[in-house]
Image (cartoon, helix red, strand yellow):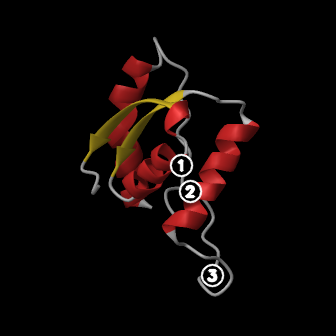
Amino acid sequence: MASRTAASRRFRTAQTRWSYAYHLVAPDHIGFGASAAPAVDTFDYGFDRLTGITLALLDRLGLDRFALYVQDYGASVGLRIASRHPERVTAIVTQSGDA
């Protein structure tokens, strides 16, 4: 639990500052952060699956154009979103993301 709290706090200051100018959506990927973690024999934790789930969330929220802030493990998801739908992505900010 401490690692989830530390990860959330790491971005708290930046998110507060950005929220004055932008609408922020910061989902946890399934199995990470505070989200549920289905057993590996019942859920495919591959990047393509996580990308599809994240795109479905963006569609459900009606977000047609957006900037991505990606870091660590989520960078692979964010970069897949950008490569599948470059017309939707206005910018990519990366921190410690393997491309």
Q: Distance between the residues labelled 3 and 1?
A: 28 Å
Q: Where is residue 34 in the image (x, y as percent from the top left)?
A: 55, 56
Q: Where is residue 11 in the image (x, y as percent from the top left)?
A: 35, 37
Disc 1: CA contacts within 10 A as few (<14), some (14-19) or many (>=20)? few
Up the image or down, 4 lies above or below 89; here it is below
**Contact between labelled residues 3 and 2, with CB atoms less than 8 Å apart:** no
Identify the residue position indicated by label 1 in the image.
84
Q: Distance between the residues labelled 2 and 1?
A: 10 Å
**Contact between labelled residues 1 and 2, with CB atoms less than 8 Å apart:** yes
Identify the residue position indicated by label 2 in the image.
51
Q: Where is residue 44 in the image (x, y as percent from the top left)?
A: 60, 76
Q: Earlier in the sequence, mark 3 or mark 1?
A: 3
Q: Which amino acid does label 1 sit on?
A: Arg
Disc 3: CA contacts within 10 A as few (<14), some (14-19) or many (>=20)? few
Considering the numbered disc 1 on the image, is that residue within a helix, a strand or a loop? helix
Up the image or down, 17 lies above or below 10; here it is above
Residue 94, numbered circle: none
* Number of the front mark, 2 or 3: 2
**Count of numbered circles in the view:** 3
* Number of the front mark, 2 or 1: 1
Q: Which of marks 2 and 1 is nearer the N terminus?
A: 2
Residue 39, numbered circle: 3
Considering the numbered disc 3 on the image, is that residue within a helix, a strand or a loop? loop
Q: Which of marks 2 and 3 is nearer the N terminus?
A: 3
